[in-house]
Image (spheres, coloured by chain):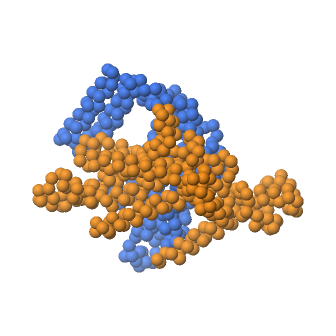
Chain colours: A orange, B blue
Amino acid sequence: MRSVLPVLTVVAVIVALWYAACVPMNIKGVLTEAERAGAAVQPEGAGARRDLPALRLAINNGFAVPATWAQDRPRLPAPHQVAAELWDTTAMKKITSKRSLVYHGWVTLSATLLGFAIGTGLGILLAVGIVHSRVMDMSVMPWAIVSQTIPIIALAPMIIVVLYSIGVQGILPKAVISAYLSFFPVVVGMVKGLRSPDAMQLDLLRTYNAGKAQGFWKLRLPASIPYLFASLKIGIAASLVGAIVGELPTGAVAGLGARLLAGSYYGQTVQIWAALFAAAILAAVLVGLLGLLQRLVLTRMGMA
Amino acid sequence: MMLVALAALVWGLGWWINLRLAAGPSAQSRGVRLAVPVIFGVTVLAVWELLVRGLDVPLVILPAPSLIAARFAASLPVLWADFVQTILKGALGGYVIGCGAAILTAVLVDRSDFLRRGLLPVGNFVAALPIVGTAPILVMWFGFDWQSKAAVVVVMVFFPVLVNTVAGLRETTAMQRDLMETYAASYWQGFFKLRLPAALPFIFNGLKIATTLALVGAIVAEFFGSPTVGMGFRISTSVGQLALDMVWAEIVVAALAGSVFYGAVAWVEKAVTFWHPSQRA
């Protein structure tokens, strides 16, 4: 609770800076519009204003400053414009409407969750294999670690097109991209977690005459849960990025990535920012839910 | 069918060699630790090649490794131009600016307890967001050339590095800081001689995370508009022309660049934080 006031202050400063940044970013467009509408602008003519610093223009034409926060297609929309667009496209539209962000968010979210489930499942299986088989550990693990340093997302456009050419479309190609982005963090985290019991604990189980399977279910798996949750949080954020990027190359018609792309084609900046914030809120909710689940599970297991 | 059978044979052989090596007496030696993943990688490549040829997989689904290698060798100038545009200008430029700004901000923030308590949760929050999404906005602001890609990279690497640096600067214990005090060290002496070195492992952790993010940002930003050169541009246009061998060649470049970039940062870390327990093992 001690950090509520500082956090609120920082957020307030960011919002204030954002409003301030709108003035120089949008002033030229506003002045051009105002001149066309017949207002007296200093200096006259868009050509004369082009090379002047934006701040000088704002000082010379103080009347135009409020308009920089209310443009139709601003270079930088003001926070309240983005908030209004978000409210308009989530709460005010039917969720089945093509213009509703809830609809687009659901398209992206379903691909994210499906891919996340696949990636996590496969990742845990591979980690179990790695921990139990020396040869798998020595041959696969170095590649799993190296794969974290390369931008695998570059594969995304190809996966979409290849899957399309063999007749797979819809949610699955995006889910595949989400899956492989969440796969490697889970493998690395789970291997670390399954190895976390120390020699003393393993020896104790041996003195109980526990088999390999019992050692796995009663010691290794419970010990790996904190590691699993840490990698799940990384994995779900990566999955969401994967699903969004997966919507870009094919010109998908639905989804948050499609909204970003459509907005950038048609110069609908407010729409881009609203989609961006929707993606951010989605990511925050997903990570937050996992955090909550983590706390519940670890408390139940007596580890937190 | 012959080739498919051969693929199964090669797979079995590679796995058998690795089994023998891993169970053998010298399994802990450096040579074997290096040889096993290499054998595994070579086996995967050989099986890939044999299966693609044996099953006549069309080029638009999966090109054979030999085809990719041939394409790679044939289009070195194009790949080099893309590499310079995307990695050297976009990713590296943005990486240097973003990490520099983040570390400077962290040093400033660290002076005020209030600011730190406010900024750390916000930074942690932002670091988990899909920041790639800012790419269309930044491309709109900074144009199609590498400047907009560098801007995306700056935004992407800033928060992970900031959060790690701020956390690292808190690493020293009260006892250590008191010792500096008894030496009558000024704030900056204490900073450079005690707190900055203690923070280095954390800073490098952030810098290493940022290497991958930088490449991702630079490549994905090109999907939103770019000049007719660059790795993201080449990938998206080659996919459109179904020239998958070119796409794979670019992916090889991206993988190499990513590993070298990460390796370079890790190497600097090893040289600078040689005293840290994690580096002495």
Name the image quarter holding residue A290.
Answer: bottom left
* Residue B82 visible within the image: no
At 57% from the left edge and 69% from the top edge, which residue is drawn?
A11
* Residue A94 visible within the image: yes
Total number of numbered labels?
A: 0
- Picture coordinates of residue B209 (x, y %)? 45, 54
Q: Quadrant of the C terminus of chain B?
A: bottom left
At 27% from the left edge and 42% from the top edge, which residue is drawn?
A136
- Picture coordinates of residue A226 (x, y %)? 33, 61
B164 or A294, nearer to the observer: A294
Give left or right: position of B152 versus B4. right
B236 or B209, nearer to the observer: B236
Taking the view exactly as shown, the residue that stands out farthest to the top is B2
Give left or right: position of B238 versus A30. left
A32 or A161, nearer to the observer: A161
B182 or B236, nearer to the observer: B236
At 63% from the left edge and 37% from the top edge, which residue is drawn?
B228
At 83% from the left edge and 60% from the top edge, which residue is drawn?
A34
- Picture coordinates of residue A154 (x, y %)? 50, 42
- Picture coordinates of residue B162 (x, y %)? 50, 62
Q: Tell me: residue B97, above or below residue A165.
A: below
Q: Tell me: residue A3, above or below residue B151.
A: below
Name the image quarter holding residue B2.
Answer: top left
Q: Quadrant of the N terminus of chain B?
A: top left
Name the image quarter holding residue B183.
Answer: bottom left
